[in-house]
Amino acid sequence: MNNILIIIPTYNEKENVQRLAKSIFDICPQVSILFVDDNSPDGTGKILDTLCSEHPNVHTLHRIEKQGLGRAYIAGFKWALERDFRFIFEMDADFSHPPRMIPDLLAAVQEADLVLGSRYINGIRVVNWPLMRLILSTGAAAYVRIITGMPYTDPTGGFKCYRRTVLESIDLDQTKSNGYSFQIEMTHHAWMSGFHIVDVPIIFEERRSGTSKMNSAIVREAFWMVWKLLFRSKFRRRPQQHLSTTTVND
């Protein structure tokens, strides 16, 4: 078994999953892919089963109902930790996270514990977003930095690579958030634990097909999550310890 897993949640992504898997393997043939499908009514699950039968490095978790992005990733993380994967990616199914960027994150995680693909390092790297969506995203990033103290340029982003030791340090069953707030909460856990986290620039492209899962409930959840994290950390806005990748056994 290889030691790199890319976790991709899906819900009504039948137009994307086959092309995405091919694009990933064209760039990184050594990786494994885990799709986590929330019983998509458009037949995505059946397409994924066919894909699994055709490629030994493609796997699918079928869930009985739509439970949200965070629950899908938690299921995927647990699946990964039951196996021998060392590096575990998060990635969207809609091509907004270009597969060609995977090697950049993988190179960075060799010297880090968690790599965040950032849309906002040294400028804005977002393609085809409406202005209000861009304002919401950049404003949310600034809001998170101000309240929590996390110094990262894109804390709500969903293109990440973890070392397994980071995920092993987190009580996944106690991680309750789902949308953007899930990304914030997971990064905050890692940061407050003292793990080494780096930003890597990516190009973010608006989805090519299908519909966005963004809604007002996701925004509200993220708004309140930063305050919950501040209270949980007893108003500390910096880690109490620093861990080194050179001393972590993974």
Image (cartoon, helix red, strand yellow):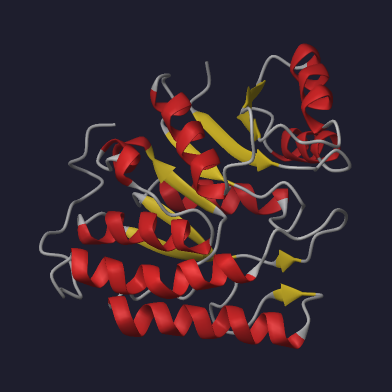
Work out whether 165 lies above or below 226.
Answer: above
Work out whether 112 lies above or below 48.
Answer: below
Asked which quadrant contains residue 206, the reply is bottom right
Image coordinates of residue 96 in percent, x first then y, are 73, 59
Report the residue at 54% width, 63% height from top: 157
Image coordinates of residue 173 in percent, x first then y, are 33, 38
In the rendered structure, the answer to whether residue 95 lies left or right of residue 231 reads right
Asked which quadrant contains residue 86, the reply is top left
Work out whether 2 lies above or below 165.
Answer: above
Q: How many marks?
A: 0
Image coordinates of residue 97 in percent, x first then y, are 68, 56
Work out whether 143 lies above or below 63.
Answer: below
Q: Nearer the viewer, residue 215 or 119?
A: 215
Asked which quadrant contains residue 177, the reply is bottom left
The reply to whether residue 155 is visible in this rendering is no
In the rendered structure, the answer to whether residue 198 lies left or right of residue 53 reads left
Report the residue at 84% width, 26% height from top: 47
The reply to whether residue 44 is visible in this rendering is yes
Report the residue at 46% width, 76% height from top: 153
In the rendered structure, the answer to whether residue 186 lies left or right of residue 103 reads left
In the rendered structure, the answer to whether residue 33 lies left or right of residue 238 reads right
Q: Nearer the viewer, residue 121 or 16?
A: 16
Report the residue at 22% width, 44% height from top: 246
Quadrant (top left, top right, bottom left, bottom right) of the C terminus = top left
Image coordinates of residue 83 in percent, x first then y, are 43, 19
